[in-house]
Image: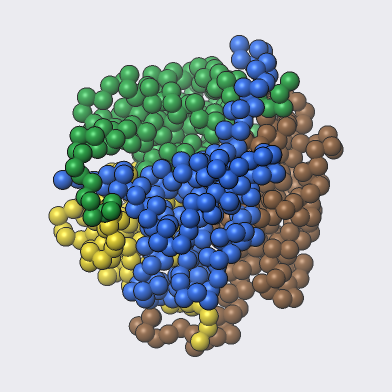
Chain colours: A brown, B blue, C green, D yellow
Amino acid sequence: MAPFVHSQALHAATLRALAERGVSLDEIAELARFLQASYIPGLSLEECRHHVERVLEKREVQNAILTGVELDKLAERQVLSQPLQGIIESDESLYGIDEILALSILNIYGSIGYTNYGYIDKVKHGILQHLNDKNTGQVHTFLDDLVAAVAAAAASRIAHHHRARQEAAYPDANPPAWDE
Amino acid sequence: MAPFVHSQALHAATLRALAERGVSLDEIAELARFLQASYIPGLSLEECRHHVERVLEKREVQNAILTGVELDKLAERQVLSQPLQGIIESDESLYGIDEILALSILNIYGSIGYTNYGYIDKVKHGILQHLNDKNTGQVHTFLDDLVAAVAAAAASRIAHHHRARQEAAYPDANPPAWDE
Amino acid sequence: MAPFVHSQALHAATLRALAERGVSLDEIAELARFLQASYIPGLSLEECRHHVERVLEKREVQNAILTGVELDKLAERQVLSQPLQGIIESDESLYGIDEILALSILNIYGSIGYTNYGYIDKVKHGILQHLNDKNTGQVHTFLDDLVAAVAAAAASRIAHHHRARQEAAYPDANPPAWDE
Amino acid sequence: MAPFVHSQALHAATLRALAERGVSLDEIAELARFLQASYIPGLSLEECRHHVERVLEKREVQNAILTGVELDKLAERQVLSQPLQGIIESDESLYGIDEILALSILNIYGSIGYTNYGYIDKVKHGILQHLNDKNTGQVHTFLDDLVAAVAAAAASRIAHHHRARQEAAYPDANPPAWDE
C-alpha cells in the first residue's frame, strides 16, 4: 500500500462529506453567483458550478473541509473533550478556528476573496442561512464558514477568468512602454 | 542616535497619516460601533473610540498604515513605476496587496475579525463610502481597506472585553469538572 | 449557566493538554531562548518562560492548541473517519492544517515570528525532536507545530519587550522632525 | 485603452524587476533545489527552474514582487517619508510588512511552504546571503523575503508534482473502502 492517501480518495471523500452534511454543489454555486452577478452580466449557475468544482479539486481545500466537517460531526455526537465540545457545539463567537480553516481555502485564490467571504458569511445568503439555524440539532460550526469560503474562492476564480476574457478582447491594451 | 525608530515616532506618524488623509478616529469608531451595536446594546461612540485608539498603538498596525498610505500618496503624485502606478491609481480589482496589509491588522486580534472586515468593506458604511469615491482625484486604494481593518480589529477587541464583563457577571459558569 | 466557556476554564484546559501530551512550559521556553539568545545576551530561561506563559493566556492560542491536540488524540485512538484518520496518523506531508493552526498562533504577535517558526520546525530543536519521533506510538501531528508556534510567538514577544527597554535607554532617539 | 493592466505586462515587469535587482531565476531555482533535494533524489536545477517560472506566472506573486521591489527602490533613492524611509532603509527587525508580502506568495501554494520559507530565510542560503549584505548600498528589505517565498512556493509545487508521480506508481493505493 502506498504510504499516503491518494488524491482521488481525498477528492471523493470531500464531495461525500458535503453531500452527507446536506450541501449541494449547486447551492455553493448559487452563493458564488450571488457574489459575482453584479460584476458579470449573464453569469450562469452552470459556469459558477464549474468553478466550484475546480476549487474542490484542490488538496488544501479538501483537507480543510474534511477536518472541519469531522469536528462538526464529532461535536454533534458529543464525543469531543470539554471544553472544546461545548465551544464547537454552541458555535461560540470567540472560537475562530472555523474562520482560520476558511482562510486556508481563500488564500489559495489570493486575497481578493477575503471581502466576499466576510460579506457572504455575514448576510447569510442561501444555504448559509440554513446552516446557521441552531434549531436543527445539527452542528455546522465549521461547515458554514467552509461553504462560504469555497463560494468566495470560486468567485475569485470567476473574476480571474473573466479578466482573461476581457484581456483577449482588448489586445492593444498592453502599453509598449510598460512591457519593453 | 538609536539604530531604530522610536515607538512614539511611529505612533505619532500613524495618527498624522490618518488625519492628513482625511480620516478621523471618530469616523473609524463609528464603523466599529456599526459592527458591534446589535450585539452590545448601548455601545457608545466613546467606548468604540477608546478601542480604536488601543488598536492604533500596535506596531504592526502602524507599519501597515504607514506603508499603505505611503503607496497611496506616491500613486497620487504619479511617481511609482509602471505598471504598479496604473494598478494602484485605478484601484485595480485583482491587485490584492491592499487586502494583504488589512489582514496583517486583523490577525493581531484573531480570526473573528475577518467577517466583519469583509462585510464593512463590501457595504461601504460611513467614511468608507467617501474613501471609495473615485471622483475626488485622491487615491485611497490602501486606506479604505486599512480603515475597515482597524474598525474590524476594534470590533474584535470590543467583543473580547464585552465577554470579560459577562464572565464577571456569571461567576459560577466555570464548571468545576472542566477546570479541575 | 453562562452560555459560554469561561476564560479560566479554557486556560486551565490548555495547560492540562500540554502537560498530558508531555510538553512542559520550560521545554517551550528553551525553544524561545534558542531563537533569541544570539540577539539578547544573557537571556534567561525564566524570562523566556514568563513570555511563554503570557502567550498561553491568549484565547486564540488556547483554541488552536485545544483543537489540534484533540485531533492528535482522536487519531491516536483511531476514531477519526477515513481518510482523515490515515492522514493525521501518518503526519502526511501535504496535509497543512497543522501549519494553518500554528499560523493562527503566530499571527497574534505579528509577522516577525514566521521565520522563527519555520526555522525551529525544520531544525527540530529540543522537545520538537522528541515530538517528531514516529516510533513512540503517539500522534503529535498538530502538537509539534503548535509548540513551535508558541515558542516563536514568545520569541516575538521577547523581541518587542527588548526593544522597549532599548528605547528607554535612548530617550533622545525620537527625532523631533518626525514627530512634530 | 483597457481599464486594467494586461497580464503579460505584469509578468514581464516582474521578470524585469528581479533581473534589475540582481536576482536570476537560476538562483531562485537553486534555493528550491536546496529545500527539496533531500526528499527527491536526482532533482535537477532545470526542473526547479521550471517550477519557479510557473510560480512567477501567478498574478498574486507578481503583485507582491512589484510592490516590494518598488518600496526597496524608493528607500534606496531616499524618497519615502519618514519614519518609513528609516525603517525600510535599515531593514528594521520589527517591521514585518516584508514578511506579510512573502506570506501572500506562500499562501497560493498552501501552508506547507511556511516552514521552508522560514528555514531558508534564517539560514540565508545562496543568493539570500548576498541580498542580506548591508554593505552594498542597496536596499533589499523586501526582496530577500520575496525571493525566499518564491523558492519555498516552488518547493511546495515540486512536492505536489512529485506526489502526483508517486500516485501514478502506486495505482492500487486507493483503498476501495475510503472511496466507495
Query: On the rendered structure, is C74 left or right of A30?
Result: left
* Residue B28 drawn at (x, y percent): 53, 52
- Residue C13 sits above or below residue C113 on the image: above
**Is residue B100 something one can see in this rendering?**
no
* Residue A23 drawn at (x, y percent): 78, 50
**Is residue A141 something one can see in this rendering?**
yes
* Residue located at (68% from left, 74% from top): A40
- Residue B107 sits above or below residue B70 on the image: above
* Residue located at (33% from left, 66% from top): D70
* Residue B120 drawn at (x, y percent): 61, 55
* Residue located at (77% from left, 43% from top): A132
- Residue A175 sits above or below residue A70 on the image: below
* Residue B7 drawn at (x, y percent): 31, 43
Q: Residue furthest right?
A: A136
**Between residues B64 and B161, which one lies in front from this camera angle?**
B161
Q: How many marks?
A: 0
